[in-house]
Amino acid sequence: MFRQIKSAIIWAYIYKFRKSLAKVLIVLFFIGVMLFLYEDVVEYLKITNRLDLLPFVIAMKWILIFGAIVYGVYLFLWTKEAPKESKESQKSSPPPKKPTKKEISRLAEEIIKKKSLR
């Protein structure tokens, strides 16, 4: 029983925060790809004995990682869903027109005629 409750809570949170979770996973995937490429570049520099370029490669790696983290924080904190309808737009729309007494009496007569024909 405890397992079912725990599973339900976990899936509820995953569903509730699915957009944020997807953004975080994309940023983590991007960082993983960058680290994989960094290892390949370092291996290439070691093979070609061009270790003088290694500080530049390390600096680029950290710039890209921090950029990805900052981008992830930006996505997570400052992007909000568009509101469905604001109160101002509801206020700006004209109120529905109230029918006059003549229109009400005409509609009532039409309804009475339809009922009498049946």
Image (cartoon, rainbow, N blue to C red):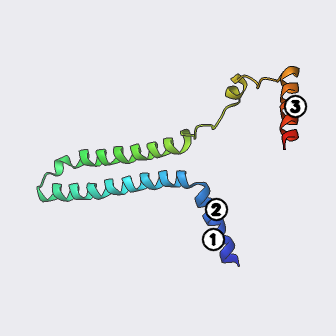
| Front-lying residue, 53 or 9 | 9
Image coordinates of residue 65 in percent, x first then y, are: 38, 48
The part of the image, by quadrant, that contains residue 99 is top right
For the point 70% across and 76% down, which residue is it?
A: 2
Determine whether, in the image, residue 108 is placed left or right of residue 29. right
- Residue 84 is tagged as none
Q: Element at badge 2?
A: helix
Among the two numbered marks 1 and 2 on one chain, the one whose residue lies closer to the N terminus: 1
Front tag of 2 and 3? 3
Image coordinates of residue 34 in percent, x first then y, are: 32, 53
| Front-lying residue, 34 or 88 | 88
Among the two numbered marks 3 and 1 on one chain, the one whose residue lies closer to the N terminus: 1
Q: Residues within 10 Å of mark 1 (few under 14, many from 20)?
A: few
Among the two numbered marks 2 and 3 on one chain, the one whose residue lies closer to the N terminus: 2
- Please name the residue that numbered disc 3 is placed on: 108
Q: How far apart are marks 2 and 3 (CA)?
A: 53 Å
User: Would you say the residues marked 1 and 2 are in contact, meaning their CB atoms lie under 8 Å apart?
Assistant: no
Report the amino acid beneath label 3: Ala
User: Would you say the residues marked 3 and 1 are in contact, meaning their CB atoms lie under 8 Å apart?
Assistant: no
| Quadrant for the C terminus in the image | top right
Image coordinates of residue 54 in percent, x first then y, are: 22, 49
- Residue 12 is tagged as 2
Image coordinates of residue 103 in percent, x first then y, are: 83, 23
For the point 26% across and 58% down, which residue is it?
A: 39
Q: How far apart are marks 3 and 1 (CA)?
A: 59 Å
The part of the image, by quadrant, that contains residue 45 is bottom left
Front tag of 3 and 1? 3
| Quadrant for the N terminus in the image | bottom right
- Residue 7 is tagged as 1
For the point 62% across and 60% down, which residue is it?
A: 13
